Image (cartoon, rainbow, N blue to C red):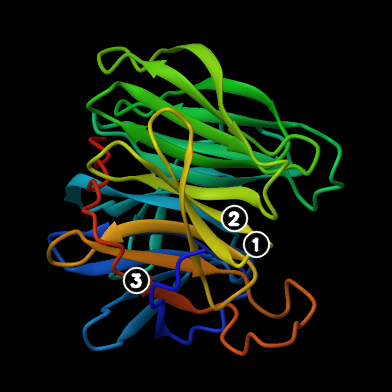
C-alpha cells in the first residue's frame, strides 16, 4: 500500500459523490452527488464549489464538444439521457433507453470518439438482481445496449491507443472488470474477456480511468484505496485513501497529473470511525499523466 499523500480538496459532505470529469477548458472538475440530485463544478485552486439541483438522481455526466442553448453537458439521469446547461441548471430530454422505473443510471463516461456511455442498476439494489445494462448514446441521440445482465454498472473507461473498452460489475458475487475490443468507427465492442477479478482484494471495483501508459486506475470501495492495474491485468499499485469508500477517480489539473477521487459520505452509509471527511473530494499526484475524457459530439 502506497503512502502517497492524498489531500482533501473539498469537504463536500456528499452523500454519494461520483462521476468526476475534468474540463481542460475551464480547469474545473465536474462531479455528481447521486442521492442529492446534484451536479457540482469545483475549482481545485480556489476551493469554490458551484452546485445545480437537477430534481432527480444524476448517475454520471460528460462534456459536450459543441455547447449550445441546450447546455455544455450530457448527463445520465434516473429518467434517461439529457443535455444539461450548468449555468442555468436546465435540462433537455434526449431519450430513455430502458424505461425501467425501478432502475437508475449509474457510472458513465464519454468515449474518445464522441459518444456517451452509461450503465444502469436496480435501485435500491437487493444485492442479487442483475437488471442493469450499459448503453451507448450516439451523437445523433439514439441509444444502443452494449452489455446486459449487470448488477451495479461501474468501471467504464477507454484506452484509445489500444482500442479497449472497460466496464465492471461491483456486485459482491461478481467483482469483475472486463475488457472488450472497441471499434472507434462503429462503437461496436467484441471479444469480451476478464481483465481482473477483485475477489482476493479487500474492496470491490467502482469507478475508473486510464493513464497515458494504458494502465487502469479504479476506486476499490470498502478498501480505503485506489488501485492501478497494468494493461495485462496485473495489480501494480495501491494508494491508500483517507476514506473507506472511494467511488471514482479521474486525472486532471493543468498538467493532467493530478488524480481526483470522489467518495461516499454519511447519510448513504453508516457513519464510520476515523473518516470525518467521508463524502469529500480528494486528490493526489501519483507521478503519471492521465488521459483527458472525450466529449459528446451531439
Q: Is residue 106 left or right of residue 293?
A: right
The CA span between labels 2 and 1 is 5 Å
Query: Residue drawn 72% across and 35% down?
Result: 100
Check whether the beta carbons of the residues at disc 2 and disc 1 lie within 8 A of each other. yes
> Nearest the camera: 145 or 81?
145
* Secondary structure beneath label 3: strand
Where does the image place residue 187, in percent across and percent down from the top left?
A: 35, 18
Residue at the far top in the pictured view: 191
Residue behind mark 2: 220
* Secondary structure beneath label 1: loop
> Nearest the camera: 219 or 143?
219
User: In the rendered image, is residue 77 in sight?
Assistant: no
Query: Which numbered disc flags the more N-terminal residue, 3 or 1?
Result: 1
Query: Which numbered disc flags the more N-terminal residue, 3 or 2?
Result: 2
Residue behind mark 3: 284
Residue behind mark 1: 223
Query: Residue drawn 42% across and 83% down?
Result: 8
Mark 3 Cα shell of 10 Å, populated few (<14), some (14-19), many (≥20): some
Q: Is residue 120 above or below residue 51?
A: above
Q: Is residue 262 above or below residue 19?
A: below
The CA span between labels 3 and 1 is 17 Å
Amino acid at each position: 500500500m502506497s503512502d502517497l499523500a492524498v489531500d482533501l480538496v473539498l469537504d463536500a459532505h456528499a452523500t454519494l459523490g461520483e462521476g468526476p470529469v475534468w474540463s481542460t477548458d475551464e480547469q474545473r472538475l465536474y462531479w455528481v452527488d447521486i442521492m442529492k440530485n446534484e451536479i457540482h463544478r469545483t475549482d481545485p485552486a480556489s476551493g469554490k464549489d458551484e452546485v445545480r439541483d437537477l430534481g432527480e438522481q444524476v448517475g454520471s455526466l460528460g462534456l459536450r464538444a459543441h455547447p449550445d442553448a441546450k447546455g455544455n453537458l450530457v448527463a445520465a439521469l434516473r429518467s434517461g439521457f439529457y443535455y444539461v446547461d450548468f449555468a442555468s441548471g436546465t435540462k433537455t430530454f434526449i431519450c430513455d433507453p430502458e424505461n425501467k422505473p425501478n432502475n437508475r443510471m449509474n457510472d458513465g463516461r464519454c468515449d474518445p470518439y464522441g459518444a456517451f456511455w452509461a450503465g444502469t442498476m436496480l435501485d435500491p439494489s437487493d444485492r442479487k438482481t442483475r437488471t442493469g445494462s450499459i448503453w451507448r448514446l450516439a451523437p445523433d441521440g439514439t441509444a444502443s445496449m452494449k452489455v446486459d445482465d449487470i448488477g451495479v454498472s461501474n468501471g467504464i473507461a477507454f484506452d484509445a491507443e489500444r482500442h479497449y473498452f472497460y466496464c465492471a460489475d461491483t456486485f459482491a458475487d461478481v467483482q469483475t472488470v472486463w475488457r472488450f475490443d472497441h471499434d472507434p468507427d462503429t462503437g461496436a465492442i467484441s471479444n469480451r474477456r476478464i481483465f481482473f477479478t477483485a475477489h482476493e482484494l479487500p474492496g470491490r471495483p467502482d469507478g475508473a480511468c486510464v493513464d497515458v501508459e494504458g494502465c487502469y486506475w479504479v476506486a476499490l470501495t470498502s478498501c480505503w484505496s485506489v488501485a492501478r492495474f497494468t494493461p495485462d491485468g496485473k495489480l501494480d499499485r495501491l494508494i491508500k485513501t483517507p476514506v473507506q469508500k472511494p467511488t471514482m477517480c479521474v486525472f486532471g489539473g493543468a498538467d493532467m497529473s493530478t488524480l481526483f477521487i470522489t467518495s461516499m459520505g454519511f447519510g448513504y452509509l453508516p457513519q464510520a470511525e476515523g473518516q470525518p471527511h467521508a463524502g469529500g473530494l480528494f486528490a493526489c499526484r501519483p507521478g503519471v499523466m492521465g488521459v483527458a475524457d472525450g466529449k459528446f459530439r451531439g
